[in-house]
Image (tube, coloured by chain):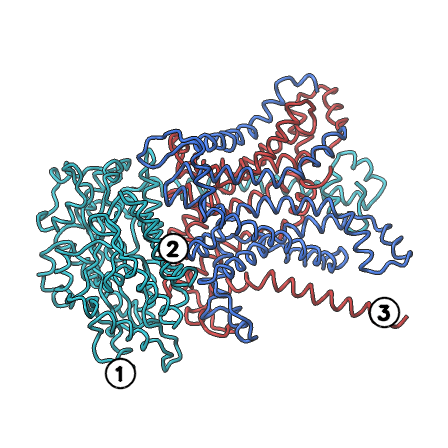
Chain colours: A red, B cyan, C blue
Amino acid sequence: MRARSMRRRVIGCAKAVVIVLAVLWSTFPIFLVVSSSFKRTSDIFAVPLKIVFEPTVENYVGLWRDWSVFFTGLVNSLVITIGATLLTVVGSALAGWVFSRCSGRYFTGSAFALIILRLIPPIVITLPLFPIANVIGLNDTHILLIALYATFFVSLGAWIMKAFFNQVPRELEEAAANDGASLHQILLHITMPLAVPGMIAAAVFIFIFSWNDYLFAFIFTTSRAKTAPVILSEIMGSATGVDWGILFAAASIQLVPIVIFVIFLQKYLMAGLTAGSMKG
Amino acid sequence: MKCPQHNCLTSLLTLNYPGASLVAEGRPHARKREELRRDLIRRALRLFKSMIAAATVGAVLFVYPAVAAVKIVVMGHRVHQDTATTGSGGDVTTDWRKANDADVEWITLGNDPLRERLFREVSLGETAVNVGFVLNAWATPKIAKLFTPLNDYLAKAPIADFADISPSMLKTMTFEGKIYAVPYRHATQGLHYNESFLKERGIDHPPRTVEELINDAKRLTYVRPDRTNLSGLVLGAYTHQIALLRAMGGAFITPELKFGGPDKAIAAYYQTIRDLFTAGVLPKAMPTFDQNSPLEWMSQGRTAMVIYPMARNAQMNDPKLSKHAGQVKVTVVPAAAGSGLAVAPAIFEFWAAAIPANAKNKDLAWSFIRHLSAPDSTVREALNGNGPVRASAYKDPRLRQKLTYAEEEQKAFFNGEAAIPAFDNTAKAAEIWKENFEAAMLGFMSPSDAAADLRRRVSALLP
Amino acid sequence: MRRLGLVPYLMTAPANTLVGLFILLPAACVLALSFMQSSYGLAVTFVGLENYTKLLHDRYFWRSALNTFIVVNAIVYLELLLALGLTGVMPPPGPLCRIIISIIILPYAVSEVVGVLIIKYMFDPGAGVIAYWLHALGLPELAWTTRPGDALVLVILLTVWLHMPFTFLIVYTARLGLPAELYEAARTDGAGAWQRFRHVTLPLLMPAILVAVAFRYIFAFRLFPEVWLLTQGGPARQTEVLAVYLYKCAFRYYDFGLASATAWAMVILSLLIAAPYFRSMHRRRFDSAR
């Protein structure tokens, strides 16, 4: 009896140690970036790592002074991210409802095609898309990036919405239809409000992806629609010894909002993954 | 889906049918869940609305003005922005910006990324870039199709004292009688050395032969009194590496577009590089270096010698940028002992400003180029560390006083050679050079194999 | 819903248009282009299978394929192991559990650009904190600038750090849904912890594990920013992965025909990886009537 409870305590301790290691593993790099953004350059390169230091905001001031284009990039990122999220949510909700309610070869086929086509690596489509986008006059615009990000997430979103709509009983809609409501009214007032958690779940994925994406922004923007990650890579590429503090400041500004966003919406991430990947 | 015993929050998201309200009547726990759910929906809808509002506000307040403001977009290397805006010569663009009430947005990239982005931009139907800097190595007839001929602009709004600008450089940028770019910066490779480090090791003069250079580099690789690791020599990019090859008597691609070799000379060069690397003379981080790295390392005092454009000596001695201001001297790259040459062949390249064929607002772009090329601007840029493209600049008293290497650089002005001459496959040849240099340096290929492989692959590219 | 007529088609139109216009059409273009020779200023000419033969004879293509293969497998299985291990030690659901999950998910929110910055800083030979500890513990240093193997190790490490939360969430939520009765039964039957794991947990989690593995294979296959921003595929092109090779073909060497052939090679490989899983998924999901 005593041996078993001893063993249980040891196992409990071991589990706690593993959890602590996992927490350190996840947070230490982020902590490093944010804390380094408040260090002087000499402190940043101090060996061994300085945990206690004199904080300074000179890196942020330097960022504003030397790389003010970064802030334009942040606004671009925000506009593009919100635009892509809205477009994805609308497209996914509509398509997801149809996939949930309507049978027929066209719909099952197109639901499937959506997923299959999404398997194509994004870099493959950049090749012809670059001149095509220019012919339409869309190069270096926010609209192009919004459309591209939405394209790659509308299929995942549609599957998530389908799983959520499957939970809304048809009888509800049929009852409303029998009462004389038009499809438009049914959708707007009954079905969609019930699926809002699903929309949030879909939105979380595309929000994170659009805010952080590098590949498309790198290839398709020059100056007008450049997003924060691209400018961050430019700062990184041209960083001389004195610029690392500015680099960390920029990275912190790009990083912290989305980290906070994920902390608050983590249960939607979980719900989205559950709905999108498992049965029903 | 049954509510798992503990995880009601998950069920919150799945039990979302309105019948729940009827069910909830009987059970307080479920009723509270129902209220939570409704509250959640209300909050989510409010969040969506505020997101749309934020995006609209952001677009109107920031994006539109940024797009609508009058400005020109200049795409070039960091050195172009630096020499035009910072240093003892001051910001050359201020007067132009005030006179035209326009902003200048600089997009600066390393050599290879610059080539990629610039050529991608000019291949489109329309581009936001107004002025692009091109390297002489990229000046092939293809440029003619991608950039605007400047003859008309030169006639309407000529550059002051145009004949002063190097005719040989202009010729490189002229195709079928049309000038496509105006030279801005020329760079002759020289040997920069930190005098104080040399003195620390008992070397009282810079190396006079290439063999002496190699030996000095080995002696200059040590741990300094303040415990920094010092590398003897740094070679950042292909121009510097080829400069050393030429100094040692080998050749890569001749101006007549033949493979220089001979294989033995290139293999000997690779062997030297490998030895220097294993001895720690060439730093371990070298494969990640780009055009700026030698400047950075010299300014931070992490290396004793670099082969680098002579004009950059000004930046290495700028107290604002360099920890060793005043200690870095520059001289010509020495030749091999038995070669009979006084100095190594001068490796020289230049940058020119061009207007993409698909750019907008070309008049504004031309006025910018014209301003940067004015005689006084050229001298100020040279004070900022630029290699001037005007013969008269070398006679200007301000420069003569400041630039000790002016004489050497002026000689190269007239008879230097390009590291890789301009032809259709210059970029590919430079890539192959880099690959084999790294392979030989890191020991992935033996020096003779690397040399033979180099000849095989590059000969296939030559016309 | 027979009365709906055209409306469902209209409702699926946004999603279908986006995907058709931005994925299907360019993919078809790329397929056509892979049989042509094309570059800046050159007229597009038909060359049949020449691009594909050039591709198969290029030693750098095989090097990048090998690198991709090694890296992707390492990433997928490392993440799976870590996710399974973490799932096993999580406390029971509750506030503490939620806090820990929030923390573990954090790396998912980090951009690859910031990730590369972190790696460069932590592993910098001079000032990096991890490099310092490796040296202090007497372990060999990770010379990622000169040894391609070490650089790939760092790429694997970074990708696992960034994406393990994804795998963990899939596995963990599946684990939460497992009925407790089975564990009770197993425990009363006298099964130890390891046996419970092997015979109860693992088989029941298999669907979720397969989903996670399939998704991660597809996404890891596209690896680009981590490699590009760390080494640009060097030194001597030894750390290239397929996406980097494609980028260089297209935007450095301007050989669009060869790049398109590479692109289609990547597409075919992606579909091959996904095919077994999606076939079984198709059978399971659409046969069961809604």
In percent of the image, x 28 and y 75: which residue is there? B216
> Label 3 to label 2, Cα distance in Å?
62 Å
In percent of the image, x 29 and y 78: which residue is there? B197
* Label 2: how many Cα within 10 Å (few below 14, some 14–19, many 20+): many
Q: Nearer the viewer, mark 1 or mark 3?
A: 1
> Label 2 to label 1, Cα distance in Å?
36 Å
Up the image or down, C233 lies above or below A155; here it is: below
x, y percent for residue A185? 65, 25
x, y percent for residue A278? 71, 41
x, y percent for residue B182? 18, 46
Between residue B396 and residue C28, name the one nearer to us: C28
Give the chain letter at badge 3. Answer: A
Please tell me the numbered disc located at residue B202.
1
Q: Are marks 2 and 1 on the same chain?
A: yes
Q: Which residue has dot 3 on it?
A: A5
Whether label 1 touches label 3, CB < 8 Å:
no
> Label 1 to label 3, Cα distance in Å?
73 Å
x, y percent for residue C77? 64, 53
